[in-house]
Amino acid sequence: MDFTLTEEQRAFQSTARHFARDEMMPHARDWDENEVFPVEALRKAAALGFGGIYVKDDVGGSDLTRLDAALIFEELAQGCTSTAAYISIHNMVAWMIDTYGSAALRAKFLPKLCSMEHFASYCLTEPGAGSDAASLTTKARRDGDTYVLDGAKAFISGGGVSDVYAVMARTGKGGPKGISCILVEKGTPGLSFGAREKKLGWKSQPTAMVMFENCRVPVSNLVGSEGQGFRIAMAGLDGGRLNIGACSIGGAQFSLDRTVEYMKERKQFGTRIADFQALQFRIADYATEIDAARLLLHRAAVAVGDHESGATMLAAKAKRLATDTGFDVVNGCLQLHGGYGYLRDHPIERVLRDVRVHQILEGTNEIMRVIISRTMLGN
C-alpha cells in the first residue's frame, strides 16, 4: 500500500492543476453566467491528453489508469467543476468505444474524440427510465444493414452540440439483456434535440432531450454485440462514478482552501474568525472528510482499473461518499463566508450549484446504497 504518487503522476497532476488555474478558473464565472460551452478550452485540454485519458494510444489516447484519471479530474474541477464533469462524460464514451468497439469503430471515431475535434454524449436516461435504466423503451429495429431508432433520451449532457451519441436502445426482449449500444452521429436524419434545459448548475455544458424518429444508422455503428449494451453502459458508469466523485472532491478542496484564507482575513468581535475554536473545528472536520473520501476514491479507482471482483461496489461506495462529502463541505464553506458566500462575486455559490447534481447523476446516491447493500446481502 504505497500512497506516494509516481513522478509521472505528479507531472500530469501538475499539468492539470496549471491548466485549471490558467485556462478554466479565470473564465468559469462567465461560462456559468452566460451558459457558454467552452469549445476552445476543451480542445486545449484535449491537446494535453485529457480527451481520451484511458483510451489506448494507437488512436490518440493517453492510455492512463483510472487512478490517474481521478487525480486529473480533481484538479480540473478546481478550475470549473461543470466543465470538468463534461470532460468526464466525454471520456466515458470514448472508453466504451475503445474497450468494446470494433477496430473499424475505434479508427473511425476515437482520433477525433481524443482531440475533441468531435464531442461525445452518453445516452441512457429516458423520461420514464431513470434509476430503473433497464426499463428503457427507445427501440432499435434491424432493417437490413441499418438500425432504425425510435424514442427519446432525457438529461443528456452535450445534447445538441455533441457529434457522437452513444445510445442504449432496445434491440431485443425486455430487461437488461435486450439492450444494445449504438453510435448515432450528429446530422443523421431523424435525430433531433429538445430545447436546452434551464438548470441550477452545470451551465457550461448544454443539457437537452435527444430524440429519434425513424433514425437510421449503420449496423456497423453497434458497439460490442447485440444485447451487450446494458453491461457496457454499467461498466462505463463505474468509471464515471469515480470521475464525478473526483470532481466533487476538487470542488470541496477549492472551497476549503478559499475559506481558510477568508477566515484569516475576516474579523468579527475584534478578532479574526480563524481564531474562533468552533470554526477551527469545522475546517478540521472538512479537511478530514475530504481526505477520507479521496482515499476511498483512489482505492476504488485501482479496483476498477484492475477489474477486481468487488470493483462495482467500491465505486458505488466512493461515489456516494465523495459526492455527499463534496456537497456538505462546499455548503459549510459557503456558511463560513456568511452573506458574502451567497453572492455571485464569490465562486463558492457556483461550486455549490455545480456539485449538487453529482449526488443525482451517474446513479443517484440512493442507488449507490442499493448496489452496496445488495452486494453485501448477496441479492
Image (tube, helix red, strand yellow):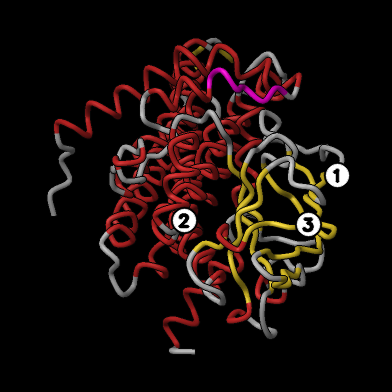
Judging by the rendered image, the residue that carries numbered circle 3 is 215
Q: Which of marks 2 and 3 is in front?
A: 3
What's the residue at 40%, 23% (across, down)?
A: 47
The image quadrant where one finds the N terminus is bottom left
Q: Identify which residue, 189 or 118, lies in the foreground.
A: 189
| Mark earlier in primary sequence (3, 1) | 1
Q: Percent from the top left, x then y, of residue 133?
A: 67, 70
Q: Is 40 contained in the magenta span?
A: yes
**Secondary structure under the numbered disc 3 in the rendered image:** strand
Q: Is 144 contained in the magenta span?
A: no
What's the residue at 31%, 37% (across, down)?
A: 62
Mark 3 belongs to which amino acid?
A: Cys
Mark 2 belongs to which amino acid?
A: Met
Q: In this view, does 133 lie to the left or right of 254?
A: right
Q: Quadrant of residue 195?
A: top right
| Mark earlier in primary sequence (2, 1) | 2
Q: Percent from the top left, x then y, of residue 308?
A: 28, 69
Q: Which of marks 3 and 1 is in front?
A: 3
| Mark earlier in primary sequence (2, 3) | 2
Judging by the rendered image, the residue that carries numbered circle 2 is 96
**Secondary structure under the numbered disc 1 in the rendered image:** loop
| Start-end of magenta stretch | 36-41
Mark 1 belongs to which amino acid?
A: Gly
Spatial CA distance of label 2 from label 3 is: 22 Å
Q: Percent from the top left, x then y, of residue 102?
A: 43, 59
Spatial CA distance of label 3 from label 1 is: 16 Å
The disc placed on residue 194 is 1
